[in-house]
Image (cartoon, rainbow, N blue to C red):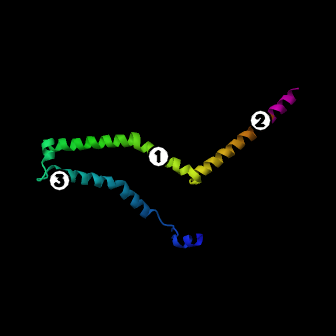
Amino acid sequence: MNSILNRLIPKQRKMSTKLGGILIIVGETMFLFSLLNFLMITRLQYYSSGDSFMRTLFPHYLLFLTALFIVAFIGMWMAYVYIFPSKQRFSQEQAIKDNRSPLYNKVLEIENEIDELKSVVLEISEKVDDIAEKDKH
């Protein structure tokens, strides 16, 4: 079964960072295009000839846009205060479940090694103290 999977899953290639860098830059700047699309769509909605509800509710386009930004800001605030911490905690708890995270397992291993080193240092310290007391007498 394992050999079948090894044949089906392609091997990763060593490449330069140019392609990955371009994709990361495009992904990070895509929200700017989304903002432009948002502005264009709001103009279409506000000035739609078949639906004058928005013009009745907001007598000026800038009031309409301000209301949308306030709603967006409230949504961002709620995401920052409630959603991000919850998602982060959930993903961290999932990562350490059932030995899924090699990094977490390595941290536990290092903690155990540090505890062992502490006990060795404590033993050596006690022996040094005993030797120092014997030398005093």
Of mark 2 and mark 3, the one earlier in the sequence is 3
Amino acid type of the residue tagged 2 in the rendering:
Ser
Report the front residue among 100 and 26: 100
Residue highlighted by disc 1: 88
Provide the residue span drawn in magenta: 127-137
Q: Secondary structure at mark 1?
A: helix
For marks 1 and 2 on the same chain, the one whose residue lies earlier in the sequence: 1
Seen in the image, is 61 located left or right of residue 105? left
| Mark 1 in CB contact with mark 2 (< 8 angstroms) | no
Q: Residue at x 61, y 48 (%)?
A: 107
* Residue 73 position by quadrant: top left
* Residue indicated by mark 3: 44
Q: Residue at x 29, y 54 (%)?
A: 34
Residue bearing mark 2: 125
Q: Position of residue 119 (x, y in %)?
A: 73, 39
Residue in front for this viewpoint, 127 or 3: 3
In the shown orientation, is residue 59 left or right of residue 93? left
Magenta: main secondary structure: helix
Q: Amino acid at mark 3?
A: Leu
| Residue that appears at 24% across and 44% down | 68
Between 35 and 83, the one nearer to me in the picture: 83
Residue type at numbered disc 1: Gln
Q: Residue 62 appears in which quarter of the rendering?
A: top left
Marks 2/3: CA distance? Answer: 77 Å
Classify 10 Å Cα crowding around label 3: few (below 14), some (14-19), many (20 and above). Answer: few
Q: Quadrant of the N terminus?
A: bottom right
Q: Is residue 137 toward the left or the right of residue 46 in the image?
A: right
Tell us which disc is closer to us: 1 or 2. 1
Marks 2/3 in contact by CB < 8 Å: the verdict is: no
> Disc 1 to disc 2, how far (Cα)?
42 Å
Asked if the magenta segment contains residue 51, the reply would be: no
